[in-house]
Image (cartoon, grey):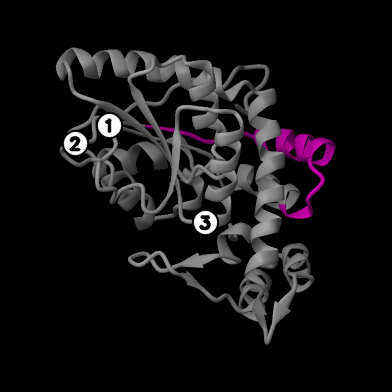
Amino acid sequence: MGPEISDLIVRHDPVSLARIPVRRDDVVDTLLAHHNAEAAALVQAMPATDGVLDAAAVDGLLIRAHSELQRLHEEFQHGRRVVRLLRPLIAAIREVHPGAPVRVVDVGCGLGYVVRWLAASGALGPDVDLVGCDFNTALIAGAQALAAEEQLPCRFVVGNAFAMATPATIHLSTGVVHHFRNDALVDFFAAQAGPENRAFVHYDITPTWAAPVGAWLFHKARMRQPLARHDGILSARRAHSNTTLMQAARSAAPGMAIGLFEPPHPLLPML
């Protein structure tokens, strides 16, 4: 299964986090090699200077796509779904480690909808530190601006969520896991199994026959950005199987109890 456009048009150095120029033709060639002419045409139309994709144009496109993605989170009441799992996890952590601070870090937070929803609702209590983390400076700037406008008790940082000076108690993500493939998926889970990390909770699309159909209907009806439509539909096709997720998590974090949750509804097997 080929990569999504958003996986290819932005690159960062994993150590310095500096942005790496991306050549448009390289992205087009990669997409064509995966027989994705539609995605290649979308990238070919993006502004470039001397063959390098315009960073400001790419960031603007990603911000618009993530703004539309928030609509999906709102309509599926994703904030409430997150709280249902975080509350008992936090209660268990506090029982075992009384008095220890609890920090929830959203990995690849984008515009920070989940963190902002948790902060606005106060559902986890005022003593839980809520942090959103992403490599993209434009998305983090957008998240910070929204949080400031809404006067929310949360913060957003540019960086590696697994290498923060103050580690997370719980790592959280939404729609991120399927971007990691093969050994990278194992490494993703292993990075969250350090001595200070108590739990990780990752939401993604259920890999059933209905998920691509539902994604196609929703994105065609509700999304206006071609990139958001393309990547959203492809995400459903790239979702990892339950077996793949469980095997990767268990091998990477043998000291943690690993489980699947929210099994697909028999009449709507896509969430």
Residue of label 3? 137
Which of the labelled discs sits on residue 236, or is there none? none
Question: Looking at the rendered structure, which numbered label has been put on residue 169?
Answer: 1
Which mark sits nearer the N-terminus, 3 or 2? 3
**Comparing labels 1 and 3, the label whose residue is closer to the camera:** 3
C-alpha span from label 1 to label 2 = 6 Å
Mark 3 packing: few (<14 Cα in 10 Å), some, or many (20+)? some
Q: Residue at x 27, y 31 (%)?
A: 169
The picture places residue 49, in percent across and down from the top left corner, at 69, 82
Residue 225 lies within the magenta run: yes
- Of all residues, the one furthest to the bottom in this rendering is 50
Q: For the point 53% across and 42% down, which residue is it? A: 144
Q: Mark 3 near mark 2, Cβ–Cβ under 8 Å? A: no
Quadrant containing the N terminus is bottom right
Between residues 3 and 176, which one lies in front from this camera angle?
176
Q: Secondary structure at mark 2?
A: loop
Quarter of the image for residue 130 reads top left
Q: How many other residues sit within 10 Å of disc 1, few (<14), some (14-19) or many (≥20)?
A: many
Task: Tell me whether circle 1 and circle 2 mark residues in contact (CB < 8 Å).
Answer: yes
Question: Where is residue 110 drawn, in percent x and y?
Answer: 55, 45
Task: Read off the magenta span.
Answer: 201-227
Residue at 22% x, 31% y is 256
Q: Mark 3 or mark 1, which is nearer the start of the sequence? A: 3
- Identify the residue under disc 2: 196
